[in-house]
Image (cartoon, rainbow, N blue to C red):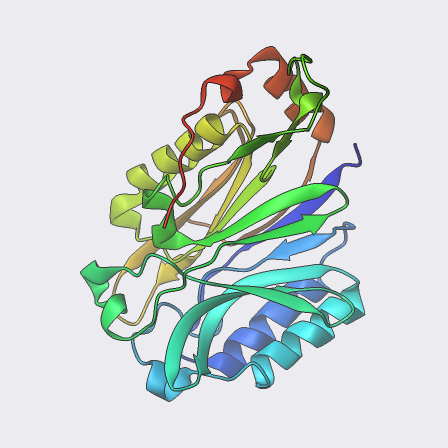
Amino acid sequence: MAPLTITTLQTNLIWENKNANLQLLSKKINSLQEKTEIIVLPEMFTTGFSMQPKLFAETMEGETVQWMKEVSSANKIILTGSLIIEEEGKYYNRLIWMLPNGEYGYYDKRHLFGFAEEDKHYTAGSKRLIASVKGWKINLQICYDLRFPVWARNRITPIEKSVGEEIHSADDIRPEFDVLIYVANWPERRSHAWKTLLCARAIENQCYVIGLNRVGIDGNNISHSGNSLVIDPLGEVLYHMVDEEDIFTITLQKEWLIEVRNKFPFWKDADDFNFR
């Protein structure tokens, strides 16, 4: 039942300039006054949404991953966001989940944005990453993944009970996750879809949803309005910021999540399916 405190950094990004972006983000993180446990950075936080991986890709032993280790350790927080990674001759839009002890997990973006030819430059991932923090399960996804609800579906597993015993409450189930996080470079012109789909993911999965987007105009003259959101399991908006750079910290309550699942046990009627 422990609460979970998360900080989002809605920021402009300096186009294809890793050093400038790392300096900017370091300054913002060091300015934090509130205690937090997780800091969320945007998609491709070192470059913006660049289609030049050959020029800007790093390895998992590179400068940015090392920077994440140092920042995470120094601030005793989990740090997450995506960057361009090269591995065995392939390029990935990879989200890193960095722990203070230097251990990490990663998620390679599953749905590549063909409209911007991301699929011609990057390799799609095939596995989800669901992290665990203080009893919370967190599903980590990237931008365009938001349009594909099957990939984000919260599969519910009943806790094994004695023969004849029925499942009555949220205490009798094991949801796959409690929080869904999207990091993004989502264009302003499609912000209505962004806001609508984030709320839909919260309602249909009965979970908290955090959508962290950038602001500013990128190197392709595409405008980003932020519209970062934190949404509760009923689809109620707890935080929404448009256009401005902003650092926001919120504490999520597990009791409210369980109350919602108990009061509205829609999970009992969910379809049973597997994705590929």
Position above or below: 39 against 211 = below
Horizontally, residue 91 falls left or right of residue 235, namely: left
Rendering coords of residue 237 (x, y %): 51, 29
- Asked whether residue 158 is in view, the answer is yes
- Asked whether residue 249 is in view, the answer is no
In the image, what residue occupies the spot 74% across and 51% down? 36
Rendering coords of residue 132 (x, y %): 69, 49
In the image, what residue occupies the spot 60% across and 46% down? 138
Q: Name the foreground residue: 160 vs 246.
A: 160
In the image, what residue occupies the spot 44% across and 23% down? 270
Horizontally, residue 3 falls left or right of residue 125, namely: right
Q: Name the foreground residue: 1 vs 40.
A: 1
Position above or below: 172 against 140 = above
Position above or below: 261 against 94 = above
Horizontally, residue 31 falls left or right of residue 141, namely: right
> Residue reaching furthest front?
163
Rendering coords of residue 206 (x, y %): 53, 27
Quarter in which the N terminus is drawn = top right
Rendering coords of residue 94 (x, y %): 47, 68
Q: How many marks?
A: 0
In the image, what residue occupies the spot 37% across and 40% down? 150
Horizontally, residue 117 falls left or right of residue 157, namely: left
